[in-house]
Image (cartoon, rainbow, N blue to C red):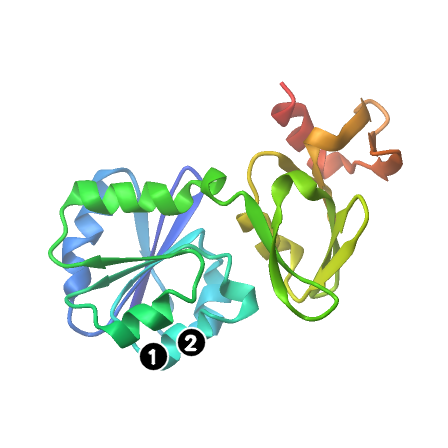
Amino acid sequence: MKARTFERHQIKILLIEDESGRASSIEPILIRYGFSSSILDDNIINFSSLIETYDPNLMIIIFFEKNTFNILLEDRFLNLPILVILNELGQEVFDIGNKHPRSLFLIEPIDEHTLLSSLNLLLSRKLYGFLEVIDSKQHRIKLNFDKILLIEADGNYTRTITTDKVYVRKITLKNVKNELDSSFVQINKSQIINIDFIDKLDLANGVVILKGKKLKISKVFKANLDFTLL
């Protein structure tokens, strides 16, 4: 397995291929459109560690191996957009890939316009107007963004708070951020708020009132609100 990262405007793409060298047709396109590349450490051979170490905004995988893709079906990776490029797509592969809510499959050969359109589609957060959470019966449900007031970190878990319920999910706040759109802003190291529910904002004193609840804005994240509400 070979891996390389590409970065442009804070978008980090993790490109992983097998030993076939098929990424040679993809890499020039990414570079042509302004992505810079870096070869990843060959010592990182564990797939999940690779993802966690380089924390990409999107992955391009140019091979399909069942056990590898099953790792991407873990809760912690379900928010990660994945573009899988294959030379053929069988029913078994399609069924497995279809379990990931943010995956897209392309069949070779592909041109650069198809590639870039696919990347834009996967990176368009507004296409995902919901957050997957776990209810009290351990059922996975899709919670619309407009129902969410606040998301709080609790170690490796998050608490998603609506007007009348709280949902707990085993996922870090850092990973949840990738599932949200521009209505959500992080205000401190442990809280992300939905700005549509702001009652009062006092940036001078670092305070926001959200549906009657007073929350503290840390100095590090103050610029997030300042910029978002311009």
Q: Nearer the viewer, residue 151 or 136?
A: 136
Q: Measured along the vertical axis of the image, is residue 43 above or below residue 210?
A: below
Q: Of the residues shown, which amino acid type is indicated by label 2?
A: Asn
* Quadrant where the image shows the C terminus: top right
Q: Is residue 39 left or right of residue 149?
A: left
In the current view of this chain or complex, which residue is farthest to the bottom? 67
Relative image position of residue 43 (x, y in whole percent): 39, 76
* Quadrant where the image shows the N terminus: bottom left
Q: Residue at x 16, y 64 (%)?
A: 22
Q: Provide the secondary structure element on which disc 1 rests.
A: helix
Q: Is residue 210 left or right of residue 192?
A: right
Relative image position of residue 68 (x, y in whole percent): 37, 76
Q: Residue at x 54, y 49 (%)?
A: 179
* Callout 1 touching callout 2 (CB < 8 Å): yes
Relative image position of residue 45 (x, y in whole percent): 39, 78
Q: Nearer the viewer, residue 222 or 185?
A: 185
Regarding residue 43, the answer to whether it shows in the image is no
Regarding residue 156, the answer to whether it shows in the image is yes
In the current view of this chain or complex, which residue is farthest to the left? 109
Q: Residue at x 56, y 65 (%)?
A: 76
Residue 85 has which mark?
Answer: none
How crowded is the residue under tag 1: few (<14 C-alpha within 10 Å), some, or many (20+)? few
Q: Of the residues shown, which amino acid type is indicated by label 1?
A: Lys
Relative image position of residue 62 (x, y in whole percent): 24, 65
How crowded is the residue under tag 2: few (<14 C-alpha within 10 Å), some, or many (20+)? few
Q: Quadrant location of residue 207?
A: top right
Residue on which disc 1 sits: 66
Q: Residue at x 79, y 53 (%)?
A: 165
Residue on which disc 2 sits: 70
